[in-house]
Structure formats: structure tokens, C-alpha cells
Image: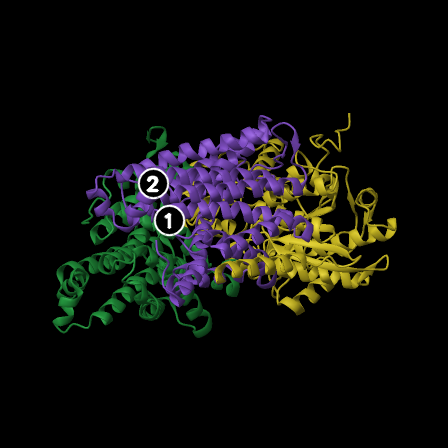
Amino acid sequence: MKLRMLTVVTAAALAAAAGGAARAADEVVIGDIDDMSGVYADVMGAAGVEVVKWAVADFGGSVLGRKIAVLSADHQNKPDIGAAKFREWADQNGLNMLLGGSNTGVNIAMAKVAAVKHVPLFNIGPGGASLTNEDCTAYSVHYTYDTVALANGTATAIVNAGGKTWFYLTADYAFGTQLQAAASRVVEAHGGRNLGAVRVPLGAADFSSFLLQAQASGAQVLGLSNAGTDFSNSLKAANEFGITRTMKPAALLAFITDIHSLGLPAAQGLYLTTAWYWDLNPETRAFGKRFYARFNREPTMDQAGAYSATLTYLKAVKAVGSTDPDKVMAQLKKAKIDDMFTSSGYIRADGAMIHDMYVMQVKTPQESKHPWDYYKVVKKMAGAEAFGPITGLCPLAPAPK
Amino acid sequence: MRITAVAYAVLALFALMVPLLGIYPVFMMQLLCLAMFACAYNLLLGFGRMLSFGHAAFFGTAAYATGWLVTAHAWGPGTAILAGVVVAALLGLAVGTLAIRRQGIYFAMITLALAQLIYFVCLEAPFTGGENGLQGVPRGKLLGFLPLKSDVVLYYVVLAAFVAVFLFIRRVVHSPFGQVLKAIRDNEPRAISLGYEINRYKLLAFVLSATLAGFAGSLKALVFGFVTLSDVQQSTSGEVILMTLLGGTGTFFGPVVGAAVVTTLQQYLSDLVGGWVIAIIGVVFVACVLSFRRGIVGELAAARWLRRAPPPR
Amino acid sequence: MTSVFGIPVAVILGQLMLGLVNGSFYAMLSLGLAVIFGLMGVVNFAHGAFYTLGAFAALLALQLFGINYWVALIVAPLAVGALGMIVERLLLRRVYGLDPLYGLLLTFGLALICEGSLNQVFGATGQSYPVPPALAGGFNLGFMFLPLYRAWVIAVSVVVCFSTWYVIERTRLGATLRAARENTPLLQSFGVNVPLLMAGTFGGGVALAALAGVLASPIVLVNSYMGSSLVIVVFAVVVIGGMGSILGSIVGGLTLGVVEGFTKVLYPEASNVVVFVIMALVLILRPAGLFGRD
């Protein structure tokens, strides 16, 4: 008897809890679904949520007379968790806009939800260029960087510096393979050759044997088509095994947090491509200072991108005078983005936010004068050069004849 | 007895009224699918005393089968679910045949190894979409006429399926087969000495458990519209063990309670404490093993018996 | 360049060498597991977590107290071993009389607590631990460049494995431990403090894991999940070698390391699962393992 009662009580409590999931009257709701606790947690993560709140506060805290609320959740690098949470917020919490954190696979899943639920989705964290090609939707904006831009920046710089033959160490998942494909295309387009690749299981503990294979290929360049701890571990091992004496490592995706955890002695000389760096100009330095005061480290391009995307969205809402998704998306694709993140950004028909990208080289320990002084600018690429032309793979943006 | 019937009626009424109470139907459907999974697992663990460490393999593979058939081959949901169930049954037969030959820790380790292999197959197979998984699985029309797009309609379908599975498991446990299974669980040497072919009983229990787990997985594919590697991963196997343990192995309603508690915890706790959820789940595990081995339902049932004499069998 | 089956000999030899290095880790870790299972009957799912704790202990010792690698090699395993003894005393002891599967589930829960907490406190991006200067550099073997530190790992692991085997199989202490497993009341009646022995055995087993963790920290980034990816593999090794057998886990670990190395050349994506294929085969054909006693 007691047991049955308890079950009923539990169920009732569940009902109360679930029913109580706030559907606050007439707020504008912005969500952030990101990896908050896994291998990419430092790239955006909890600090990224704070940054979104700063953007909301800097905008004034309300738009069109409605308060702005910010929700956040951890997708734990699982597409099903990310998509389920997105759908729940859209159904139950009146979500108006979502910021997508790291992990291409999760963002692809969320893009599908965006298309069904008609909620604008800003992909801040992921790299996979398929988000503006096969996986594009009318409601997604790929904001910060993508695999095409990374390859156009880093691979071009290295081939031009003499690295003609390439061998890739590729993380065996969507992002890794897309990045390798993009880099291979660039290498061949500039007269280089791709000698081969080895696909490494995600999260492998030991790269030494894969690196030996890379070395055996005789290639000049070791293309690291991975990210996060995979990147750091593989580079560490490459140094340890003396691979870096005969092969030049290419960091196809690296964040400032990766360089910080590797340390300059291990990372010096690396070429990498980034959308944003804290020490570029007074505006970026101001943002960096604000971030540093709060978090004791400098922000990554994703965190800067999250700030900018939030403001861009709110400005569009204000301009159109409504949160209607179709009107806002139309406005977004007309808008010019000029803020701390980029001075000449615009959103293309396929959803890609075209802006300048920077090819950087990591400084040597001697060249670095203060904490987090890690990069020197090698080249500034205009948006069109970085992101390349429309491929026509997205139905929303047919290739020009 | 009457009180039990009344309590069940109240619960049934509550379940029927869920959409009207404003509870998020997708959450409830997720809960029901996991409860089905846990009940299926309990058939093996609670009534058969076989600890399988890789049960997510059946759950997830059926989900992939159903998802793929609906997406790539435009099968109807009913036939796709049936196909998923068949796949799970066959897989259960294969794994069970290999694993039953050993007991205890070795049995658990075989299921673990085979589950890792199945995970690898799901990862590498071209049609599963690898790390991205299967996306955009449409719900279609059940039996050709009932559109499942509405969350509310699908909720009632899933609820009906859950009730069917629950009643089926009760029937199995109370059947002669179930009695022999319990005898094997309680005293295997004696069952052997009585002339029962215990391996056949164990295998049948394993296959039944795998099949029902597959049913839960297939439904889940339609509820969420996607199937990912999480569904065949070690962590999902661990979760179902936790649900069953927490709710009470060897009871009927235990796994349901366990599923409800764990799902709700994960849903609402992760909003509050973020990544600490994992550590908290670990604490729950430890607490269950140390002092709560009978699980929620089991403890309550035991408390009830302590207050008065056990009922006559 | 000469080649076998289209693969250069240099690559094969290189993989063999690396396989030995990885195998050394597997051997040390599975040694601890085998000791705990063989002498206590407990399947320690938290073994990976103790390995991670060993690495973190070394890292924190360096960052907070400036304790260098050489001292950490001794201090970290002792600290983690002490923690293990406390865990055994307070928690594990309560499940001895029960179905061994409860011990498994208990340690599984402990692993979750440990890894989840470490992840929350230290974050997900791993931290770097420097290779001690005395072990930096390496030597050119012709077919590959072998870092000195990796050679050191092989050496330490051989010494540790052999010593542990010797202690358990050939000394009086080892005989006492084995007797405890066979007949506890009888041993206690001889005046041996069995509970202390049990706590010490568990502590010793996890100290071995922690030692492996310290050895690993200059090689991989120290992060909260470094153990969980290893622990399932290590279990497979113990099963393959024979669940109670010290020799089995040593041989099994080294062999598996080499097999994995070859798989990485021939079919790299499968390098994570080849161990399970072997484990499944062994369990089906010879469940006691290659050297097992059960």
C-alpha cells in the first residue's frame, strides 16, 4: 500500500516539476547549448554563457519592451542530448534563438530541429562546412569559422612556405574528415601532393604509432586534422618522437586555450587560422581585458563570436520590430556586422557569416612579452578569400552560373 | 489486493491525462521507453540473475534498424518497429548463445566485449552515419492511417506499448517458464538435479530481454527522430543497470520507478549542477549497493512485510 | 626499403617497439587488477580512476609543492595506496559476503564519483606534465627514433612486474596473501591480521595503478578521463591472461600491446576493438584465460 502511494506521490511530484518548467510570459528567450564538461568545455563552455549575458546586458537587457532571458545546457558532445534540449526549449520555453557550441555532429542534429521548429540557430562552435552545404537550413547561421576557411588559411600558408607533400592524422569523425578533405583540396590546388592519411579513433590515448606511419610516408608536412585534446596529445607525441624534426606540423584547428595548455616551447612556430584574437586592436583588447578580469584567461574566437552573434541577433530583432523567425532571418541576411568581432561581416544566402580570417604563427618563448601573447599575424584574409565561393550544394544558395 | 488495484487505476488515470496536465509529452515518452528498457533488463537481472554489461547493444541496434528503414527505405513505422524487434531478437540469440556458456563475472565480461564490438560495427557501418548518427527520422503513419507527427498521438501509442510490455513481462514471470527461471536463479544446482535444461531457459530469458529492449529502442528512434552512438554506448548500458538497481531488481514496478527517478534526475539536475551529475550518479550507485540493495520498490515492499506477517503464497 | 606485405620493415619494427611501450602500461595496470581479483575476489572497476588519481597526484605535487618527478614516483603511489586502503576499509568490506557482482557495481560507482569530480574541479582540457630533464631526448634505433622516456617506461614496468610476481609467488608474504584467499578463518586462527592484509592488498593493487599513472603523465595530457578509456582494455587483458593470474596479466598485457600496434598499421580504425575480439574468443574457448587457474 505504501509503495503504491509513494509511486503516485512521485508521479505527482514529477508532474508538478515538469509543469513548472518556466514559460515566462512574453520574454525573448536566448539559449546556449554547448559542451560544458567535456573535451571542448574550455573553448566556449560556461564562460561562453556569461559572455552571452554580457551581450544581453550591453544591449540594454530588453528588446521591443520585452525582457531577455538566457538559458544554457550541456550537450555532453551527444547529438541526441543537444537536439532533444533544443526541441524542448522550443516547445516548452518559447525559445527565440539558439547559440550552438562546439561539435559539428551535435550542431548538424540541432540544425534539423531548427528547420522543423523555425528557430534561428547560430552555429558558433562547430567547424564542419557541411552546415552551409548539404546540411544547410533556412534558419541556421554558421558564424565563427569553418573547415574551408581553416584550410584556405593554414594549408595555403604552409604550402607556400615550402610544405608541398602532406600526410594527415585525422580524427575519425565528421569534423576530422571534412577538415582533411578541405585541406587536401587546397594542397592540390597550390601544386602540392597528398601522400596519405591515417584515421585515428576519437580520443585515442596514444598517437605514437600513427605518427610513425606519418613519418614513414616521407611527407614534409604533418597535417593534424583534429581538435581539442586529440590535437594537443598528437603534437606532444610528435615532439617527443622527433617527428617534428623531419616534418612540419600543421595545426588545422587550434584555439588559444590549446596553445596555452601545450605551452610555447611545444607549440612555437605552428601556423593556425583564427577568426579573432584578443590582441588585434583596441576593441578586441578591451573585450579581452574584460574577459581576463573575470576568468583569468583570454577569450577564444568562439567566445568572442558568441558575444557578437547575440548582439547581431538582437539588433536584427530591433530593426524588424518583431521576433518572427522568417522576418528576422531575412533581416540577418541583409545586415552588415561591424563590432568587436569583425568590422566587415555579412551573412550569405547559405547561412555562412563571411568575415575576415587571420593566419597566425605561434610565437617563440623569446618573442612572447606578456601572458597570452602567443600569436603574430602572418596574413589577414578577406572573407571572400577565406570562405571561398558558394558551392551550390545548399538549395538555398545555388551556385552562380 | 483492492488497494493495489486502486493504486494502479490512479496511475493509469494519471498516465492517460498527461498531455492535459501540461507535462512535456516528449519527456514522458522518453521516460516510458527507458522504463520499458529497464523492465526488459530486469527480466534478465532480477528474475534470471544474469548481469549483462552490454544491453544497450540491443536497444541501440534495433533503433538503428528502425531508423534506417524509415529514413532510407520509407518503411511504415509499424513494420519498421517490427523489423527492429526482429533484429534485436536475432542479435540477442547470437550474443546469448555465446555468453550463456559462462556465468557470473565471465558472463558479464562476454556481454561487455560483444557490446563493444557491436558499438564498433555501428560506428563504422556506412548507413549509421557514424558519429553524427541517423537524423531526421520521420514518424510516418501507423498502420497506414494514424499520423504520428503529433507528440500527443505518439504519446498514447507509446503508452499502449509500455502497458503491453509490462503486462507481457508479468505474464512471463508468472508462467511456468518464469517459475523455472526463478528456481534457476535461486538454486541452480538443484534445478539441474531436477532435470531442467537450464541453458535453454537462460537463453530464452536472454533473447526475450533483448527483444523487448529492442522494442524500446525502436520506439525511441521514432519519438526523438534520431539515433546516435549514445544508444549503443557503454554509458547507456550502465544507466539501465542503475535504473534497475535503484528501482529494485526482481520487482515489477521497480525498474519503472528507477527509470523515472534517473531520467528526472538527469533532466533537472543537469540544469542545476551541470557536470556534477556524473559524480552524483556515482554516489547513488554506491549508496544503492551498500545499503539500498533492494532498491526503492524492494525496500518499501520489505518494510511492508516487516509490519505484518508475510502473506500466504 | 624492404617490406613485408607492402609495409616497410622499419614501420613494423617501429610498431613493435611502441607496442611494447603500451604493453608495459597494460601489464602494470592489469597486474594491479589481477592482484586484487586474485587475492580478494573483487573486480575493481575503479582501477582506471586510481590510475588517473596517480597522475593527478604527481601533477598537483609538482604544481602545489614543487615535488619533482622522481619523488612523485614514490609519493603518489603511496598516497593513492593509502586512499585505497581507506576505501577498502569503509566501503568494499561491506560487500564481501555478497554476490561478487555487487563489488563490481560498487567500484563502478566509485569510478563515476572520482572521474566526475575531477572533471568538474580541473576542467576537461588536460594539463601538461613535463618530462624530467634526465629522461629527455632519445636515441636513434635506425628504424625509428625512440624517446628515452619510453624506454624508461618499459624498464620500470619490467622491474615492477617481475618484483610483484616474485613477491606473490615466491615469498612468504605472497604465500600468506594467497592463503587469505583460500581460507580466511584458518589463517586468522594462525594469528594473521587478515583485515589489515586485505586492506594492504587493495592498497597495493591501486598503488600499482597510481604508479602507472605517474609514469603516464609526461606522455599524455593529465585529464579526468584518461583512466576510463584504459580500464575496459585492461579488463580485457586480465580476462585474456587469466583473471587470477599474475603471470597471465603480464604476458597478456605485453602481447596485447604488440597486437594493437600491428592493428594500427593494418587497420587503424579497429585498433580500439581488436582487444575485445580477442577477449571474446578467449572467453568462449577458454574462459579461465591463457594462464588462469579457476
Residue C17 shows in the view: no
Which color is chain A depicted in?
yellow
Query: C252 or C232, which is in the foreground?
Result: C232
Q: Are marks 1 and 2 in contact (CB under 8 Å)?
A: no
Chain coloured purple here: B
Query: Under tag 1, what secondary structure?
Result: helix
N-terminal label among 1 and 2:
1
Q: In x, y percent, where is residue B144? A: 63, 27
Which residue carries the number 2 mark? B176
Whether residue B26 is situated above or below residue A279 in the rendered picture:
above
Q: In x, y percent, where is residue B55? A: 42, 44
Tell how many labels: 2
- How far, Cα to Cα, is label 1 from label 2? 18 Å
Q: Residue at x 46, y 45 (%)?
A: B233
Which residue carries the number 1 mark? B45
Looking at the image, residue C30 sits to the left or right of residue C173; the answer is right
Looking at the image, residue A80 sits to the left or right of residue A401; the answer is left
Residue A64 shows in the view: yes
Look at label 2 and name its amino acid.
Pro
Which color is chain C depicted in?
green
Q: Residues within 10 Å of mark 2 (few under 14, many from 20)?
A: few
